[in-house]
Amino acid sequence: MKKTAKMLPLEGIRVIEVSNAWAGPVATRVMADMGAEVVKCENPQRPDFSRGWPPFAEGQRGVNQSGYFAIYNRGKKGVALNLKNPDDLATLKRLVKISDILIENNAPGVMDKLGVGYAELVKIKPDIIMISLSGFGATGPDSIALAFGPILEPYAGLSSFFGYPGDTPFLCGMAVSDHVAATMAAFAALAALHNRNKTGKGQFVDLSEVETMLACMPEAIMEFTMNRRQLPPQGNHDEIMAPHRVYRCQGEDKWVAIAIDSDAAWQSLCKIMKQSELACDERFADGYLRWKNQDALDKIVSQWAAAQNHLELMPIMQKAGIIASPVYCGEEIYRDPQLRKRGFFAEINHPVTGKRELPGVLARLSDTPGVVSHADPLLGEHNDWLKALLDK
Amino acid sequence: MKAVLDDVRIVEYGESISAPYCSKLLADLGAEVIKIERPVSGDVMRRRGPFLDDIQGPDRSGVFLYLNSNKYGVTLDIEKPTGRDILRKLLKDADVFIEDTRPGTLDTLGIGAKDLKALHPALIVTSVSPFGQNGPYKKYRGADLISWHMGGPGYVTPHWIGTAKQEPLKAMQTASFVAGISAAIAVMTALNARDKTHRGQQVDVSQLESTITMFGYCLAYWPYEHRSDTRVSKPAIAPENFIQCKDGWVCMRVVEEHHWKTFVEAIGNPDWASHGLFDNMYQRAEHWESLQPLLTSWAMEHTKKEIFDLAKRVSIPIGPLYSMEEVVSNPQLTERDYFVEIMHPEVGKLTYPGAPYKLNNNPWQMRLPAPKLGQHNVDIYGGRLGYTKEELVKLYECGII
């Protein structure tokens, strides 16, 4: 067992995860990174979906080879429990007795049917904190609808103003709602935990992914509740900043993001583009004019950017006071000097896939920092550990 | 009813989205938040639309009003020595300080994390910045556009577009909100640690890093398959697509075989489904050009509601694309009392998004509308810190409050 010199912030807190794929695993991953002992329960007949999803180590498909699974489940213990089997259910209940938090993202009602709903859990552990994460929430006429990420983005109205102006609707590139809801679930669990430290009382938290998305889109909601207007598709545009887009650079699918937020930044950009005549072009002389004439502006910046290297631009522009960065692909993130310097990445050593580097902990705590303690569990890897723990 | 964080006192010196959203999350659960703004100009979000009735003004920005409800508001110029004294006094009674100044700024002013630790060892100093408190980019400037496109999600968005002709897109201000939630997680982690150690600490939240950690799976491709995920790919499995229907669009995620089988039965086993072209998720992706018009001609016969009702009845993942009008009047959200109203002295009663969680023992509450600029100067500086009326007038005249 690796022992860090400093105490882990959530040391001594045990979290049970009864969930699948995205939101539940991401929420408990955050807590594992902060030192909680997370016990992930998987059905051996139907293990976590993401064990079956690419990428796989060197492309070799296998239940213990998915990088998708690894990135969301590193640092956890894994036990195989079929909750429809009475013995396994009894094991879960004994585990609840010595745990602090249970996070689940099954369809509403599933945990009740299995006999481990909140009403049952409080009988076993009166101060248990249970977080139920679902697509639409535990109540209401749509709570029964199947809630996969791609259904929730359009349902929450995000797809009504996401995308290219005048084009058909698109989904975002990853399950946005699942990820955002996962962070929210971790926050709610920790708030309930602090309350338990203070009052000795537990909590049941009913968390809706759709509602989490809505909490993060006030611009569109307030535009409607205040002015009865639908926000049009936004692209990369900003309410007032222009230029505010990504521009194609040299190379295949390489882009630079630029946001000009002041006259000074605009003057700097003209200098970097070596177009001194633009610096005194009346069409772009202040923020309002740049916003109004942004189509013309975009053309000029696009033309210039096309001959540039997207990686080299960032230090040049940032040192001149311009908000700019490359659009990174996955590989480039792993090579970034800032993230390297800050020691952001964590290496895991997995019994099947070996050493892999993954993104690290979400924030730095000076006194009690988090840590990526070990690799993602093999299916059922900690069954014996759990048995020993419960027999203690 | 007692709130879960009613013992926590927070001072916020933040603007725009991330830091204010972090402290709003804590305020909604009962923490006392005193928001500090620069005199005269205030939080930049006060100058961003949408504004009520399209009439601009510092107390009419919908996003500002939302992000800063449940907080008290004071003005303070912390660059002036007297301003810093007042800040130190405010922090003396606080548990958490949340700030988003450029890294190094507070150190220069003598109120950096180290200085504050000496003053108040139990204080949790949470700094939110674009790239973190150290490293070669620490002074670089950020924006939602930057953290989103640099942190991974941009390069893969939109999903499965199949061509690099169109640019990577951002999705509203998601990266900024995620940084705010991440900061709130970090604050709660530090508070839980403090419950045991009775010590405060410095919390360093990088908007770039929080984006990367939250939107992870596309970042597994490099360590596992030595390539990068991209939006420029054709779907390997289908259908996971928008399909046009009679009154708009629905999104189908009918990929898993049991879902597809149920779907085909539910629409009456059309002939085309048994032609052998669409028998599994990979085939359906391969023959998408033929499948899409068939799905569309079925969907064009039905409304969003009819299709969603069918999906609910037979348990398959298909859902409607809602406009904001439909979202705001959605019976699901109404029944759950999601949206909330509160009276504000300038804009009156408006409808705001609520909090996304229901806590059975200690629910969140909308208690206060967003403060007007400096609204609580007299209450906080006078009532709490003991400044006299005459002193407050002088501080105001000198531009310190």
Image: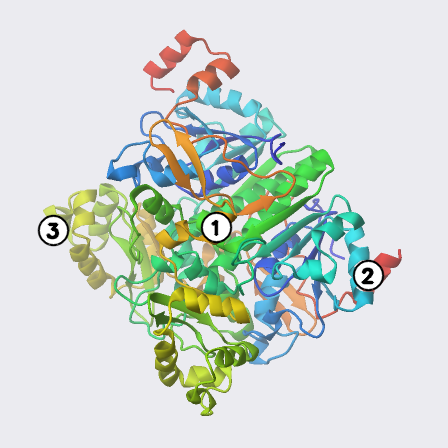
Residue B255 lies, with reference to residue A169, above or below; the image says below
Q: What is the three-letter code of the residue carrying label 1? A: Leu
Chain letter of mark 2 equals A
Residue A330, image x, y percentages: 46, 66
Q: Residue A90 got which mark?
A: 2
Callout 2: SS = helix
- Nearer the observer, disc 1 or disc 3? 1
Q: Residue B333 got which mark?
A: 1
Residue A45, image x, y percentages: 70, 75
Total number of numbered discs in the rendering: 3
Q: What is the three-letter code of the residue carrying label 2? A: Ala
Evaluate whether label 2 is on the same chain as label 1.
Answer: no
Q: What is the three-letter code of the residue carrying label 3? A: Glu
User: Marks 1 and 3, how far apart in space?
Assistant: 54 Å
Crowding at dot 1, Cα within 10 Å, few <14 / some 14-19 / many 20+, comes out as many
Indicate the quadrant containing the N terminus of chain B: top left, top right, bottom left or bottom right. top right
User: Marks 2 and 1, how far apart in space?
Assistant: 36 Å
Residue A299 lies, with reference to residue A9, above or below; the image says below
Crowding at dot 3, Cα within 10 Å, few <14 / some 14-19 / many 20+, comes out as few
Residue bearing mark 3: A277
Residue A71, image x, y percentages: 58, 64
Chain letter of mark 1 equals B
**Toward the viewer: B245 or A344?**
B245
